[in-house]
Image: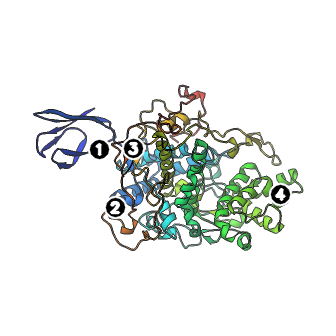
Amino acid sequence: QETSIHVTGGTDCEIVGPVEILNRHGCSLEVMATSLTESYLVVYDRFSGILAEFSLTPKYVRREVRTLSDDDRDRYLSAMHTTHSVSNTEGIRKYGEQYRDSDWFTNTHLEYSCNRECDSFHNGAGFLNNHMSFTLRFEKTLQAIDPRVCVHYWDFTIEGSHIEELAHSILFQDDWFSIINPTNEQRIVDTGRYKYLPLSYHSRSEAKDSAVINAYGILTVPWNTNPTPFLVRSQEILGLPNWQNIPSMGCDAFRSAMEYSHSFFGAMLEAGTNIHTQPHGFVGGYWNYDPTLIANEAIFNSYMLNVSSALNAAAKGLWRKGFVECPTYCAPGSPPEECECGLATDRVKHHYPNATSYDLLNMTGVLTSLEQMADGALSYEPINSSIYDIVLDQVVNFGHIGTADTDGSPHDPVFWTIHGMQERYMWQIRYLAKIGVWDFEDVWEFSAASNPIYEWSEVNDTLQFPYKNDTTCPGHRATDLVPFPYILEHQEKQFISHQDYWNKSYAFSPHVPYVYDQLLNWTMCGWIFGLDMSSDDDEYDLSDDGGTDDHGGTDDQVPPGMGNYSIGNYSMGNYSYSNITGGGGGGGGGGGSGLVSSPSDTADSDERTVWPLSDTR
């Protein structure tokens, strides 16, 4: 539609169309769109005629949560809380068809992640597409509640670089994301904005076809046998304070990731693991462990925080492979020790009658994973068989996991702030490749071995292991469909392929309805791609001392390093993209469009795989 700004001389301006003047100084106008409608604007003087003509493509700006005004932050956090308090039925009636409640998002993530045959959301090429389309679907729900809101992000490198404990971060104050270190025995978040957020309960018959639940009927992963039906968090991992390893969320993690980010395969692997898993674990934590596991200081202790993430992945992997079985029903009120997962003894003894704990850990790859994470603290040779008995027992009966570190993590509001960091990371790589300053091979590929399919549909008795099919898990192939309909702007087909989504979701793409406040500059790290990624560790104290800044937040919490940067003709500010031309997302550093054609962009939907999740359920 045509929108005109009439300049009648001096500072007297008349506005026609869906825009508002924010600043009127002479003939300089700042225009803010009040909707995402693309407009063609004409600026002219009644005597001299047209002065300028340009098109306006409005986008939401996703910002680091600490830089939001008090009002914007409260709107964001309040809209998220609404998804926990208003059901699907009531929300759709009140807010419209885009609304979905928290249970819907939590169960969606569980359905795609906890299929026993393979993980369609993680451990593969589709990781970023899956999570960013999922986040965009959540953003549409928030905007149905409040059109001024979008999904802002948490730059956890700030905590990783400059804060000793997450409990000291302003994010985990009561009026922000609530406490991270509850002191009650169940670790229930019991104070603040998100206190006592209930986890949905389903009877076994109700959940059979529609929800992933544990033995108590709670919406969470089957191997998390925690009976507590609320949002839970812990600042401990296997008895150790997790703040000891907070630097793993800092700048060094991103520096290290860059070394392996010259190909799609390498960059996606880093985005899905090394710069993704830590904040989930540090916010969630886990407990109810075997205390003898960390009694062997020479074996674990200082390595336990690293080993913990490997144990978590191992528990899920052994359950998927058939080495672990979990109860399907536990009576309400029954104690946790009567409702535990365990080794699938009959199946294992039938196939491996003489296998020791060391043998089982070794043949399933758990020992290799632990060895890598423990930095050599575990020996490949059995030095003490009882140690491996303890490790195996902990893996098969994992204990209780904080909400944020399970596949039911969307129930924790912090979940939605994490994945913007991985998208910013990938957008930067592809943008710098486009302008010729980063070598990046933008070709969709991933190793099927990292996420094979275990054919449980072929298992006919309790003694049979599933057949391992070394083909790519659905949800990670270029031709698989992104499971959320009409998710991008200008999307003509109801569902589009992963390749098509990848080609259309890059910095400044007309198909993406948002931008990030910073792209090339990372608050605490400077340029993670280039010569200077340093910051003085003593220069900024980001703990909360009660001071305030001009934005209504605490003065210590306003991240520095918000200056403008430029590479050639590409100027980059905090949120101004006027000097950036459009373009694709990669291209091997040659400055071309970088758009990789999809092998099936023109295929009909029924010729490709789309998982059977109903967006209206």
**Residue 331 left/right relative to 39:** right
Q: Between marks 1 and 2, how big is the CA–CA gap? A: 20 Å
Identify the residue under disc 3: 568
Q: Name the amino acid, label 2.
A: Asp
The tag earlier along the polypeptide, 4 or 3, is 4
The tag earlier along the polypeptide, 3 or 1, is 1
Number of the label disc, if any, that sits on residue 242: none
Q: How many marks?
A: 4
- The x and y percentages for residue 216 are 64, 58
Q: Are marks 1 and 2 in contact (CB under 8 Å)?
A: no
Identify the residue under disc 2: 70
Identify the residue under disc 4: 359
Q: Between marks 4 and 3, how big is the CA–CA gap? A: 57 Å
- Looking at the image, is mark 4 or mark 2 nearer the viewer? 4
Q: Name the amino acid, label 1.
A: Thr
The tag earlier along the polypeptide, 1 or 2, is 1
The tag earlier along the polypeptide, 1 or 4, is 1
